[in-house]
Image (tube, rainbow, N blue to C red):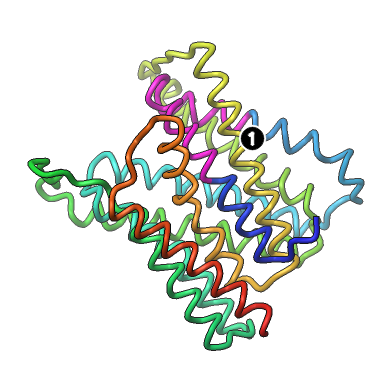
Amino acid sequence: MNLGGPGFAVLSAATWGSGDFFGGLASRLGGLRPTLVLSQLFGFVFALSLLPLANEGLPTTEGFAWAAAGGAAGLVGVGCLYLALSAGTMGLVAPMTGLIAAAIPATIGIVAGDPVGPLLLLGMVVALAAVVVISLPDRYAGTPRTPVRQGSRVREWALIVGSGLGFAGFYLMVDHAHEAGSGTAWTLVGVRLASTTVALALLLGPALARRPVGFRVSRKVVGLTCLTGLGDTGGNVFYIIATGLGSLSVTVVLASLYPVSTALWARVVLRERLTRTRLAGVMLAVTGALLISAGSAAA
């Protein structure tokens, strides 16, 4: 498959978005903690199954450590995101988290010397705008705003920044792991090992504190979490490949377009209508991806 860095980054976004969609369904039916743990476990098993196929040598200690750190950072980002969404203003949380997560690594990549011409830079700006627009929640006439709890503004912003930094840390650390010689499959295993460990710690924490932990895990939930793990891990695979083929700034911006895939899955499976805001976000995403592709070819 000769798609180049931008092509694999787009595949990463599409696969990640699919995982998010099925993860959302599983969370509705079975709760957040079981979904998080089961999806990570399935993803870890999937990552291990790729090792014999990859035929890679053992990774460097430094590379594997970077991969594990990236996996832990990514799961912390997910945890902060869900906490922020549950307690804050949803119209602010998702767009700001996505913008922080994409903008920080992209800026670092450009400062580090990634070649960025005018067309490529325009495409990146348009794509970042698409991340914000597509992440905005639907607001219908007569629907009240989600209130912010008294005194929680500082906590809300702390969670937003924490989530954005967690995802940004994942992008950057996986890039470092690849550069340090961890390879594709071993980087994936390191990411999944750490994320599964953190997820299990989040699950067992209340039990160790002698607080009840409830479960509602049906066959449907197990199936959905399996699809979630496959989608999330598949997105990791394509992102790792993309970092080895293209520049960090381009890869991270394109990979951050995963909300587009989530919205399209919701339209096809749940028959949710695409609002004008979502359609505008999809159009911006397509335009940004095309500009980035043209700018990358020119560079």
The answer to whether residue 171 of the structure is visible from this angle is yes
Q: Quadrant of the C terminus?
A: bottom right
Mark 1: secondary structure? helix
In the rendered structure, the answer to whether residue 230 lies left or right of residue 275 reads: right
Answer whether residue 156 is magenta in the image.
no
**Residue drawn at (32%, 40%) of the image:** 273
Position in image of residue 288 (x %, y %) = 49, 69
From the image, tell me which residue sits under label 1. 230
Measured along the vertical axis of the image, is residue 265 above or below residue 33? below
Query: What amino acid type is highlighted by mark number 1?
Result: Leu
Position in image of residue 215 (x %, y %) = 43, 15
The answer to whether residue 149 of the structure is visible from this angle is no
What is the crowding at mark 1: few (fewer than 14 residues within 10 Å), some, or many (at least 20)? many
Position in image of residue 246 (x %, y %) = 70, 70
**Residue drawn at (66%, 43%) of the image:** 234
Residue stretch rendered in magenta on the structure: 17-41
In the rendered structure, the answer to whether residue 99 lies left or right of residue 240 reads: left
Answer whether residue 25 is magenta in the image.
yes
| Tally of numbered discs | 1
Measured along the vertical axis of the image, is residue 86 above or below residue 244? above
Position in image of residue 159 (x %, y %) = 33, 52
Measured along the vertical axis of the image, is residue 173 above or below residue 221? below
In the rendered structure, the answer to whether residue 219 lies left or right of residue 215 reads: right
**Residue drawn at (50%, 19%) of the image:** 221
In the rendered structure, the answer to whether residue 283 lies left or right of residue 292 reads: left
Q: Magenta stretch mostly in which secondary structure?
A: helix
Q: Quadrant of the N terminus?
A: bottom right
Closer-to-camera residue (8/282) = 282
The image quarter containing residue 147 is top left
**Residue drawn at (63%, 59%) of the image:** 9
